[in-house]
Amino acid sequence: MQLDYGARLAALRSTLGDVLAVVDVDALRSRIADLEQKAAAPDLWNDPEAAQQVTSELSHAQSQLNRVTGVERRLDDLEVLVELVNAEDDEAQAAETAKEADAELAAVEATVSELEVQTLLNGEYDPRPAVVTIRAGAGGVDAADFAEMLLRMYLRWAEQHKHAVTVMDTSYAEEAGIKSATIEVDAPYAFGTLSVEAGTHRLVRMSPFNSAGKRQTSFAAVEVIPLLEESGEIEVPESDIRIDVFRSSGPGGQSVNTTDSAVRITHLPTGIVVSMQNEKSQIQNRAAAMRVLQSRLLIQRREEEAAKKKELAGTITASWGDQIRNYVLAPYQMVKDLRSEYEVNNPSAVFDGDIDGFLAAGIRWRKRAVEV
């Protein structure tokens, strides 16, 4: 028995070479070494939030490196396996080994394809974890049930890929299903990968909630936003502020309005002004004013992040005319993405989390749309 995988193996090597050039394995290893050094610091957990960020980044980077280098090893092993098949004199043994080689080749091709798609994710927020919100749209009880089906679909997809996933919030509908749910998928490139799911999803089926057994159309909206880094304590460089001191006004007593103890701090980049004169000394007023300024800057940053997330999420109406994907269970079986034209005829598998084909097709479609 002779296996001729030369062309397929060569294509895999070529594609993997392109992936490695984009990933930059040396830079990734350097990043891991830096994170490992930080993680080994004895005072790491003095700041739990910072420690969590370091360990999470380290885990993600190690996972990415293992995945890329693992594919290289699997390709090497596969070539050896093919050689064993071609050199085997025992036809039965050769057939068994060939079967193993076929399965491994298909698996490696799938993994390389996923890595190739990831190289297309070069947006500013693409590497971030994702927050996915599913909301029931038009369609009554069927829509609420459909929203729950989509929730399970994304949870199953995350679990199959061993991504950390957390259900952050769920609002249950009265009769069945959910009004809305929000989950966090904490994995490298989760936002870039899942962002193509954002939009209106449409389900057509024989309604289990309709006594007449009529076909029912319902809708659900999916919103995907990046999980941005937590805005911790705001650091304000001295060069960004102007400090003026003046005499306090108001009732006297204990030298409050007899010395230049009041402080006015102007944050030059934003124009925010904070004045403080309640304390007895200039030092105390300055410290109090800085705390207030930091609080205002923190609030402003969060508002800007919320606005950015809203912009990234876009406006989704969950109704006729703007759906991105149809899930048809009756009178035939099909799931079709209306943008990429990618379709499958096994809705059960899709609802069980098998959406990698849709994600890859969506990412490639988006890349083509940008280039046009």
Image (cartoon, rainbow, N blue to C red):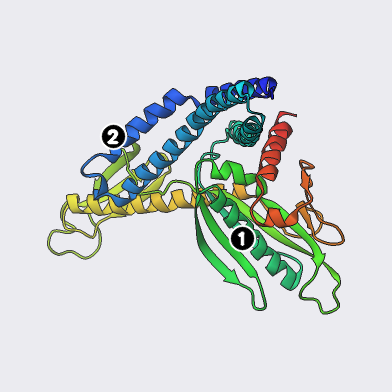
Closest to the observer: 113 or 244? 113
Q: Quadrant of the C terminus?
A: top right
Closest to the observer: 311 or 222? 222
Question: Dot 2: few (<14), some (14–19), or many (≥20) neighbours within 10 Å?
Answer: few
Q: x and y percent of residue 116 in the render?
A: 61, 31
Type of amino acid at the residue the image marks with label 1? Arg
Question: Dot 1: few (<14), some (14–19), or many (≥20) neighbours within 10 Å?
Answer: some
Q: Residue at x 70, y 41 (%)?
A: 362
Is residue 73 rendered to the left or right of residue 290? Answer: right
Is residue 369 rendered to the left or right of residue 260? Answer: right
Q: x and y percent of residue 318 in the render?
A: 73, 59
Is residue 265 rendered to the left or right of residue 124? Answer: left
Q: Is residue 42 above or below residue 347?
A: above
Q: Residue at x 67, y 20 (%)?
A: 6
Type of amino acid at the residue the image marks with label 2? Gln
| Disc nearer the start of the sequence (1/2) | 2
Q: Quadrant of the N terminus?
A: top right
Residue occupied by mark 2: 37
Q: Is residue 315 above or below residue 250?
A: above
Whether residue 94 can be seen here: yes
Circle 1 SS class:
helix
Circle 2 SS class:
helix
Is residue 249 rendered to the left or right of residue 123? Answer: left
Q: Residue at x 69, y 22 (%)?
A: 2
Q: Is residue 299 above or below residue 82?
A: below
Residue occupied by mark 1: 152
